[in-house]
Amino acid sequence: MTLVSLIAALFLEQWRPVGSRHQVIRLFTGYADILERKFNAGEHRHGTIAWLLAVAPAVLGAWLVYELLYDVSPVLGWAWNVLVLYLTMGFRQFSHAFTGIAEALRAGELNQARMLLGEWRGQTAREYGSSDVARVAIEQGLIYSHRYVFGVVAWFVVFPGPAGAVLYRLAEILAERWGGREEPEFGEFGGFSRRAFELIDWLPARLTAISFAIVGDFEDAIYCWRAQALSWAQQTQGIILASGAGALGVRLGEPLRQGGELQYRPELGIGEEAAPDHMQSTVGLIWRTVVLWLVMILLLTVASWVGG
């Protein structure tokens, strides 16, 4: 059921993509905002309580609904899996912007590419050159493929029903919404959400990185992972980006001009300067990784049947 659910959700999302701000996510973020207003007194323990109140009921509810529906009919349980996966994962939540940027660069429309990248990241890209735009877009694409596909799939396979997929997505949202805030008045409220997601994402990130290496240039990917990942500010992202850059044979990271100043970023990867062709190679790398994961899940499923 796991493999069939994943394939069905992937096809459904390709046919009718769900927006990153769909109603379910808006409801959850609204609920998270209420919890923040009620519990945030600037202390770590308040953030822990709020995180548990935000995540635990949804994860438990997703599992209970699955069990109830499965008891009625396995088909209903499968349909619930597909629905939850459809709402928590998907290429199209990032691939539309990625494709638009690549097409603009190939057409020589640098300003259009800058605008699309700025809208995607929520940060201006007016000072970027063509290579800068391609490089940052590839970085975003690799991270988003992990956050919206591989991380969700990894936890979906681990937990019963769709509970793992819900856990990963909600933890990721709270890490961005609470864990990324640095205002003094916000205090340590977001500390737990940040650390919780780091723990939840520890294994999926490494599975994604090793998968990039397997379907790309294995030797360079492993070298970059070992030699460069720790230099990145966010270690988990550094692992994914270093492995992806090595697998693609492209240089990522490197300084960027932002707000009239040169923003230092360590170099990741080895090989050529980023270009639009590397963006197409990135799409191929991600799709090969998807196929690899589906094949591995199929083999695990067959092995469990044989062993049973």
Image (cartoon, rainbow, N blue to C red):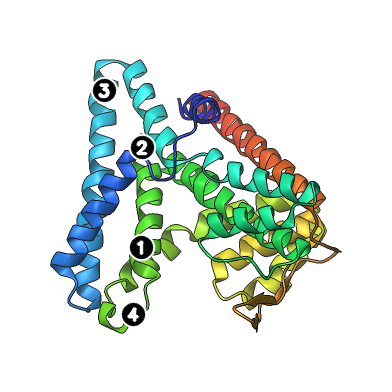
Provide the secondary structure element on which disc 1 rests: helix
Give the mark nearest the N terminus, 3 or 1. Answer: 3
Tell me the amino acid under the disc marked 4.
Glu
Label 4 or label 2, whichever lies nearer to me, is: 4
Of 74 and 180, which appears nearest the observer? 180
Which residue is drawn at the image coordinates 56% and 46% (left, top)? 94
Give the mark nearest the N terminus, 4 or 2. Answer: 2
**Can you tell which mark lies on residue 210?**
none
Q: Tell me if label 4 and label 2 are in contact, CB under 8 Å.
A: no
Q: Tag 2: Cα neighbours inside 10 Å, few (<14), some, or many (≥20)?
A: some
Give the mark nearest the N terminus, 1 or 2. Answer: 2
Q: Is residue 7 left or right of residue 270?
A: left
Which residue is drawn at the image coordinates 80% and 51% (left, top)? 108
Give the mark nearest the N terminus, 4 or 1. Answer: 1
Of 298 and 130, which appears nearest the observer? 130
Of 273 and 233, which appears nearest the observer? 273
Label 3 or label 1, whichever lies nearer to me, is: 1
Q: CA distance from mark 3 to mark 1?
A: 32 Å
Residue denoted by label 3: 69
Residue denoted by label 4: 183
Q: Tell me if label 1 and label 2 are in contact, CB under 8 Å.
A: no
Residue denoted by label 1: 177
Q: CA distance from mark 1 to mark 2?
A: 27 Å
Which residue is drawn at the image coordinates 64% and 32% (left, top)? 295
Label 4 or label 3, whichever lies nearer to me, is: 4
Residue denoted by label 2: 160
Tell me the amino acid under the disc marked 2.
Pro
Give the mark nearest the N terminus, 4 or 3. Answer: 3
Q: CA distance from mark 4 to mark 1?
A: 12 Å
